[in-house]
Image (tube, helix red, strand yellow):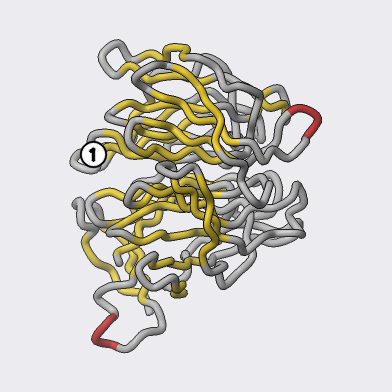
């Protein structure tokens, strides 16, 4: 069922209801939001001071880009801000204590990088910070209590990494953490209540996706397992909202997913929700104002790009 409604921040949008009882349909729905100015894939998205940021990726020519865009929900507008110092894709973005970092990623084709950059909002520029202990791309980065946990992905010679690198903002130094139990790339993660939930991914092959959920406990430097996802997906996005983990999209070698699943840590259970209107992989997801913005990505397996932004209303 599709009906026209007003988007919560003022834009006219399309509302997509899921196959749930009628009394539930005012929730668990999708609306559209203003598209990104450029079609992109292999990006991440984060929220800093109530605005959404995306950076790098592949553009509509399937070329690596340096572009950075910021979305202001009040103005309903995307703005291009300072470019990255160098082109990157498969590069996690993370916000820790009101600071935005771009961590590692892939450059020069699919070569892992060890760079870390901090965005300076005052001067609109990116500043080099201490690099990762090793080059790493297609990984995750999540912030807990002033530390940035970087896990998964692959390094030099496309070797999967089980090592964890932890950056301390206060000291500007990196240390090691307990290795991730399942080495994988193209995984996703979000921090919830002081823990890092790491989900999905693949062992270099999109036809060997994982359903695994592993939870990192920074206080004890240890891992536990959660219930696996209902589906096996790599190239997905994940975001935390209201104490739960939401996951979106992914791909195989020949297809993309419109999957949308939610994990509740309190019950260790997954729920399948209203599917994304646009199936895609290599997408960004960010929670803002009680909703999830699912941004750009690849609408077909491999190289493909879209600028679409769809917003999930829980």
* Nearer to me, 184 or 186: 184
Q: Position of residue 262 (x, y in %)?
A: 43, 67
User: Which structural element holds mark 1?
Assistant: loop
* Nearer to me, 228 or 68: 228
* Figure check: 228 above or below 97: below
Residue depicted at x 40% and y 49%: 195
Quarter in which the C terminus is drawn = bottom left
Q: Quadrant of residue 241?
A: bottom left
Taking the image as drawn, is residue 40 in sight? no
Taking the image as drawn, is residue 106 in sight? yes
Residue depicted at x 59% and y 54%: 299
Q: Quadrant of residue 47?
A: top left
Q: Position of residue 301 (x, y in %)?
A: 69, 54
Give the residue number, with chain letter if any, for mark 1: 50
* Figure check: 2 above or below 255: below
Residue extending farthest bottom: 21
Q: Position of residue 157 (x, y in %)?
A: 81, 30
* Figure check: 268 above or below 152: below
């Amino acid at each position: 069922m599709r009906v026209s409604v007003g988007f919560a921040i003022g834009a006219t949008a399309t509302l997509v209801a899921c196959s749930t009882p009628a009394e539930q349909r005012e929730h668990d729905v999708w609306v559209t939001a203003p598209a990104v100015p450029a079609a992109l894939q292999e990006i991440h998205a984060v929220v800093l001071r109530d605005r959404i940021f995306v950076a790098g990726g592949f553009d509509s020519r399937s070329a690596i880009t340096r572009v950075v865009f910021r979305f202001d929900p009040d103005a309903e507008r995307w703005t291009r801000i300072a470019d990255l110092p160098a082109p990157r894709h498969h590069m996690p973005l993370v916000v820790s204590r009101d600071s935005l970092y771009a961590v590692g990623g892939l450059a020069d084709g699919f070569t892992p990088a060890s760079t870390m950059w901090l965005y300076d909002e005052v001067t609109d520029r990116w500043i080099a910070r201490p690099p990762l202990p090793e080059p790493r791309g297609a990984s995750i980065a999540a912030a807990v209590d002033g530390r940035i946990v970087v896990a998964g992905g692959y390094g030099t010679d496309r070797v999967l990494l089980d090592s964890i690198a932890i950056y301390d903002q206060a000291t500007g130094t990196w240390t090691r953490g307990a290795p991730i139990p399942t080495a994988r790339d193209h995984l996703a993660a979000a921090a919830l209540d002081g823990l890092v939930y790491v989900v999905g991914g693949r062992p270099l092959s999109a036809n060997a996706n994982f359903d695994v959920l592993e939870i990192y406990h920074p206080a004890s430097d240890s891992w536990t397992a959660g219930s696996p996802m209902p589906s096996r997906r790599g190239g997905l996005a994940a975001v935390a909202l209201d104490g739960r983990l939401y996951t979106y999209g992914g791909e195989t070698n020949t297809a993309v997913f419109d999957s949308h699943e939610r994990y509740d840590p309190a019950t260790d259970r997954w729920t399948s929700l209203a599917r994304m209107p646009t199936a895609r992989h290599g997408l960004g997801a960010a929670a803002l104002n009680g909703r999830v913005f699912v941004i750009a990505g690849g609408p077909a397996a491999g190289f493909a790009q879209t600028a679409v932004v769809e917003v999930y209303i829980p």
